[in-house]
Amino acid sequence: MPRLTLNPLPAYEQVKAFVKTQISCGHWRPGDAVPSEAALQQQFGLSRMTINRAVKELAVEGLVTRIQGSGTVVAQLHRISSTLAIRDIHEEVLERGHEHSVHLDRLETVRANLALAQTFKLRQGAKVFHSVLVHHEDGVAIQIEDRYVNPAAAPKYLSADFSSTTPTRYLLEHAPLTEASYSIEASLPSAHEAQCLGIQASDPCLVMTRSTVSGAHVASWVRLVYPGTRYSFSGKFQL
């Protein structure tokens, strides 16, 4: 199956980038008021929903604080931490000025084994959705996304067009995140993973496993495999 090029960077990321720039340049200091959602909506010409999503994500990332009845302010420095946010790899690649493409390796319904049943709090043998995608940056494979999804959280997941969206973006829109847990470790790829990434089975990889909760359901469990020589996790924090 050929690789597919996705759409441009979402509008809400432009709003987030604007706010982050104002903070990082020192134009907005801790405690300063952030323009209201109505003002941002007028400034960017975007929907209220789009602006609301941008502000919510900035709050989750610890950059702003939403105060009920008083609006939104720039977070105090002690509240800005090295939190690992859930990012859409398509957006990450575009932010680096490169082209993102994806190869859909697998999209199916499977029966939950004991481990999956325990993860999703389902009975063993229950149906779960399964997708495997290989993400590329300028034609070079940088991530395998091996994901299982709870049908109760995203019943139309198998009908999603992953040529125009990613599983991460789809789930953020259809199964809003309320909780997440993750782990990162160094590991060797499986034979199939090595083949998909175009590396040797002896080449070390960074592997993140992550589960997400949406409301009353464990929504997804994903294994993200990155070639160690092509990808790194980074972040920054201030004291």
Image (cartoon, rainbow, N blue to C red):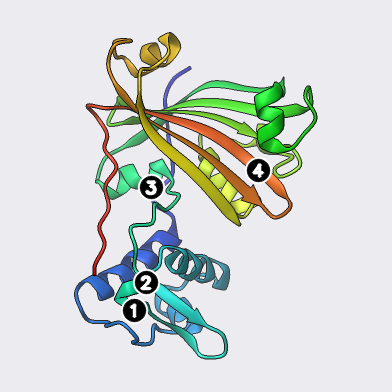
User: Mark 2 near mark 1, Cβ–Cβ under 8 Å?
Assistant: yes
Q: Is residue 210 above or below residue 116?
A: below
Q: Which of marks 3 and 2 is nearer the N terminus?
A: 2
Q: Which amino acid does label 2 sit on?
A: Arg
In the rendered image, the quadrant that contains the C terminus is bottom left
Tell me the CA gap for discs 3 and 2: 25 Å
> Residue 206 location, x and y as percent?
34, 30
The residue beneath circle 4 is 219
Q: Which residue lies at the image location 62% right of the left edge and 55% below the top edge?
A: 176
- Marks 4/3 in contact by CB < 8 Å: the verdict is no
Question: Which of the 4 image quarters holds residue 119?
Answer: top right
Spot occupied by residue 144 in the image (x, y as percentages of width and height)? 43, 26
Q: How far apart are marks 4 and 2 (CA)?
A: 28 Å
Q: Spatial distance from mark 4 to mark 3, Cα to Cα?
A: 22 Å
- CA separation in Å, label 2 and label 1: 6 Å
Q: Residue at x 57, y 68 (%)?
A: 49
In the image, 59 versus 3, the foreground residue is: 59
